[in-house]
Image (cartoon, rainbow, N blue to C red):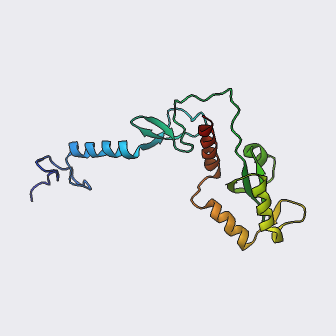
């Protein structure tokens, strides 16, 4: 049986054994370069992102982007400007209860609250928090921000968490977007 040759017209280059596509080494390298330029390559950043601290980035021919907050690595961060305010409604689980609260400084706020798990963040301020409190009023422990778990509350939290592996990465992205809008 003859050795396979490259699929590209007028190329008779040999194909590596077990190659998933019949391309010679040169055409495979050209294809890989094209994919890299089109999709970027996920890799460890040369240094932590100055905006969110992530070590995961995407390498493009034009430079690096943070994979979490999409900050362009190397762009200046104006340390004299205060960080933008990003209000979030947070959902914490402690035992069989869920706390619905709001803050613009979630790391500081959540460090001060006993909880087992951060379930989700929702972009919003006190108005959104009040609407959630009203929506789940039947499950609320009187005069607190704590709620009994219910199918409706669990479904709401699940919808917020859908597709989000880490709520902190979502908060970092919202912060990055706020900085970008500020200019």
Quarter residue 60 falls in: top left
Look at the picture and state if 1 lies above or below 136.
above
Question: In the rendered image, which quarter contains the N terminus?
Answer: bottom left
Asked if residue 83 can be seen in this view, the reply is yes
Query: Is there any visible trace of residue 115 in the rendered image?
Result: no
Q: Is residue 23 left or right of residue 1?
A: right
**Quarter of the figure with residue 68:** top right
Q: Position of residue 162 (x, y in %)?
A: 59, 62
Q: Residue at x 73, y 54 (%)?
A: 89
Which residue is depicted at the point 59% across and 55% down? 165
Left or right position of 152 against 176: right
Count of residue discs: 0
Residue 174 percent across, percent down from the top left: 63, 46
Compare residues 87 and 34 and report the one nearer the observer: 87
- Residue 26 position in % (x across, y down): 21, 42
The quarter of the picture where the C terminus appears is top right
Residue that extends furthest to the top in the rendered view of this protein: 80
* Residue 138 in the image, given as x and y percentages of width and height: 83, 72
Residue 45 located left or right of residue 151:
left
Which residue is at a point 58% across and 40% down the rendered structure image? 54
Instruction: Name the foreground residue: 118 vs 105.
Output: 105
């Amino acid at each position: 049986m003859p050795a396979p040759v490259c699929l590209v017209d007028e190329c008779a280059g040999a194909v590596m054994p077990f190659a998933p596509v019949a391309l010679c080494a040169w055409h495979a390298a050209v294809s890989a370069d094209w994919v890299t330029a089109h999709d970027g390559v996920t890799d460890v950043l040369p240094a932590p992102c100055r905006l969110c601290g992530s070590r995961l980035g995407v390498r493009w021919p034009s430079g690096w982007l943070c994979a979490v907050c999409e900050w362009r690595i190397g762009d200046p961060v104006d340390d004299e400007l205060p960080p933008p305010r990003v209000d979030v409604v947070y959902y914490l689980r402690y035992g069989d209860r869920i706390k619905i609260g709001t803050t613009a400084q979630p790391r500081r706020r959540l460090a001060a609250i006993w909880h087992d798990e951060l379930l989700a963040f929702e972009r919003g301020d006190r108005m959104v928090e009040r609407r959630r409190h009203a929506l789940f009023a039947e499950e609320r422990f009187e005069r607190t921000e704590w709620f009994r778990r219910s199918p409706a509350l669990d479904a709401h939290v699940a919808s917020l968490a859908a597709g989000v592996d880490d709520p902190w990465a979502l908060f970092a992205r919202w912060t990055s977007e706020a900085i970008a809008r500020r200019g």
